[in-house]
Image: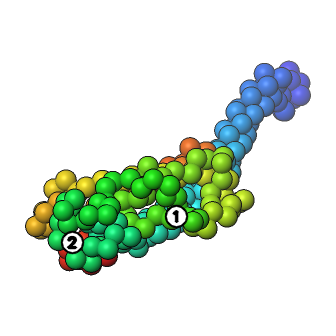
Amino acid sequence: MSPERLRPARGLSLIELVVFIVVVGIGITGVIAAYTQYTKSSVDPIVRKQALAIAESLLEEVGLQAFTYCDPTDPAVYTASSATAAQCPALLEAIGPEAGQTRGGVNPFNNVNDYHGFSMPAGAGMTDITGAAIPLLSGYGASVSVSASTGELPNLLSNADALKIVVTVTGPAGVSVILQGYRLQYAPNQP
């Protein structure tokens, strides 16, 4: 026998080469898929932070409004001691805005509960308190719900002394942020 015949063959066979290409291809596909998912979701924290900032701003705007038994335009606003028509002869406050009231403009919201049902739909664009559009936030939407506290704050003398405010903001890519707060009536006659 010649020494050349005993020596094993060197190199790759065609089958080994094809298997190598398939394995490397699957690995690269997995890495690209993971990278694509990572780059898609890297914007989510920014969208979520912006939605949270909008919700915080709107919750603060609502919470800074007066919380009185009578409408602030009623002469008895500072003397009323309960939410009755006898105490508020001109206009008793109720959940929801009074006729003609809007967020901004000539007849603006003037009490916390006036914001109940207020919304800025996504696509229509967010506006500031004066009604001016904020173009870069057109993909966001917001809604506000105001309701009487129902035993969620146990140390209150009466549930009528607190209003629950829920602000929901939706953003691009299905992002949704919900913030909840309470507006307390510290004394019956104080706004």
Q: Which quadrant of the rendered structure holds the N terminus?
A: top right
Residue at x 25%, y 55% (from the top left corner) = 148
Q: Residue drawn at (66%, 58%), measured in percent from left and top? A: 137
Question: Could you tell me how far apart the alpha carbons at marks 1 and 2 are, in whole angstroms?
Answer: 23 Å
Q: Nearer the viewer, residue 77 or 137?
A: 77
- Secondary-structure class at tag 1: loop
> Where 55 falls versus 143 (above or below)?
below
Helix, strand or loop at label 2? It is: loop
Please tell me the numbered disc located at residue 26. none
- Please name the residue that numbered disc 1 is placed on: 107
Residue 28: percent from left, percent from top: 73, 40
- Seen in the picture, residue 141 relative to 89 is either above or below; the reply is above
Which coloring applies here?
A: rainbow
The image quarter containing residue 94 is bottom left
Say few, some or many: other residues with alpha carbon within 10 Å of mark 2 (under 14 / 14 to 19 / 20 or more).
many
Amino acid of disc 1: Asn
Tell me the residue at 14%/67% (across/down): 156
User: The disc labelled 2 sits on which kind of residue?
Assistant: Ala
Q: Quadrant of the C terminus?
A: bottom left
Q: Earlier in the sequence, mark 1 or mark 2?
A: 2
In this rendered view, identify the residue nearer to me: 108 or 32. 108
- Identify the residue position indicated by label 2 in the image: 80
